[in-house]
Image: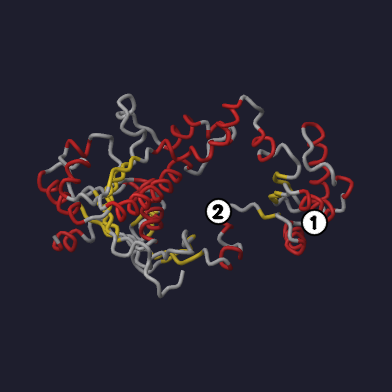
Amino acid sequence: MNSDQPLPLDGITVIDASRLLPGGILARQLIDLGARLIKIEEPGVGDPMRMVPPVVGGIGVGFAALLRGAESVCLDLTTDAGQEQMRRLASRADVLVESFRPGTMAAWGLGYEALAEINPRLVWCSLSSFGRGAAVRRRLAHDLNLIALTGALEAMGPEQPRIQLADVGAGMLAASSILAALLRRERGGRGGRVDQPLITGSLPFVTWRWAEEAAGRERVVDLLLGGACPCYRVYRCGGDDVLAVSALEPKFWLGFVAMLGVEDLAGAGFAMGQDAAAVAARVEEALATHGRDHWLALAEERGLPVSAVHTTGRAADDPVFADAGLTEELPVPGSESMTAVGPWLPAIGRTPGRPAPALGEHTEKVLAEL
């Protein structure tokens, strides 16, 4: 995006009373798009992400990465004073995000209906576990519960995943919902209520699988993309490094086996069962003759979809991220900075250079504005 152009959400104020990763993922997107995000935190405690190690410069690095450019205001929403201050903030805001159990904000006099009377243009977004249904409104869940319930956990295999699909997915979906609600507001003049339950976060990942189950058919996606076919799987090469090969298109498989010198496997890219195992063994035997860098150079020269399999620790060193402009310095309190991924939205957003706020850093400033 041209740096001379205004960001899409310039002038939009977001009050963020959510906690943990889903709200952080959402916050990062809205901030990068230009919104002013005022994070409401419990006095003396703050968002639990602040305390998750490793802690650098007095702040958890996850919080530092996701809440760059935010403002922190401490309010005790269980008190009359905190509730009144929240109402005054909401009266001037465009968006309010919260992640309490359904009904909690209403019990404090801060429910959607009450705040919409004060500010009809307010877009309200709730990030509860399961939404407002009578049978589920009091149930709680974290990412592991959510991916287990949708079938995503079973689909990923026997090991417990180390990435949070539901939390991240829900934050992404919530951003889309809020942007759509803001667009609708511009057309109709009123805001509205957006419920984005965290259980929805992993649904995009399993929609195709659910459709196959509903049709009562074999899981083709599992077979094609789950490592059953030689043309789409990971292989070990020389030096015990690992390569990811995604040669689904016949032209790429033909180029891949030609690169390895095993042209007799040209018709075996979609082999199954024991045949697939035999083909994969031949491929891995050929790959073992050279190290990863050798094969990556050849694959790039021939335009083949072959890549390294990195740990997150090594990923930042791959020049593809720097060349694509997807690494930047992460500012943290004090003089330290670290390499981070971003911007997430390079075509239309910018990540602020201002670090994540200290707990309550902007309380006096923001409340003085009221």
Q: Tell me if I can see residue 285 in this picture.
A: yes
- The residue at the far right in this view is 264
The reply to whether dot 2 and dot 1 touch (C-beta < 8 Å) is no
Q: Residue at the location (76% across, 58% down)?
A: 295
Q: Position of residue 280 (x, y in %)?
A: 79, 41
- The residue at the far bottom in this view is 4
Q: Nearer the viewer, residue 119 or 26?
A: 119
Left or right for 35, reference 207 = left
Q: Return the residue at label 2.
A: 312
Q: Amino acid at mark 1?
A: His
- Residue 190 higher or lower than 336, as above or below: above
User: To which quarter of the image does residue 145 belong?
Assistant: top left
Q: Nearer the viewer, residue 205 or 21?
A: 205
Q: Position of residue 44 (x, y in %)?
A: 22, 49
Task: Specify the label residue 290 is tagged with.
Answer: 1
Left or right for 5, reference 165 = left
Figure disc tally: 2
Q: Position of residue 102 (x, y in %)?
A: 27, 34
Q: Quadrant of the C terminus?
A: bottom left
- Residue 111 higher or lower than 318, as above or below: above
Q: Position of residue 301 (x, y in %)?
A: 76, 64
Task: Specify the label residue 128 is tagged with.
Answer: none
Left or right for 214, reference 70 = right
Circle 2: element type: helix
Q: Tell me if I can see residue 242 in this picture.
A: no
Q: Amino acid at mark 2?
A: Thr
- Give the Cα separation between the discs numbered 2 and 1: 24 Å
Q: Residue at the location (51% across, 64% down)?
A: 327
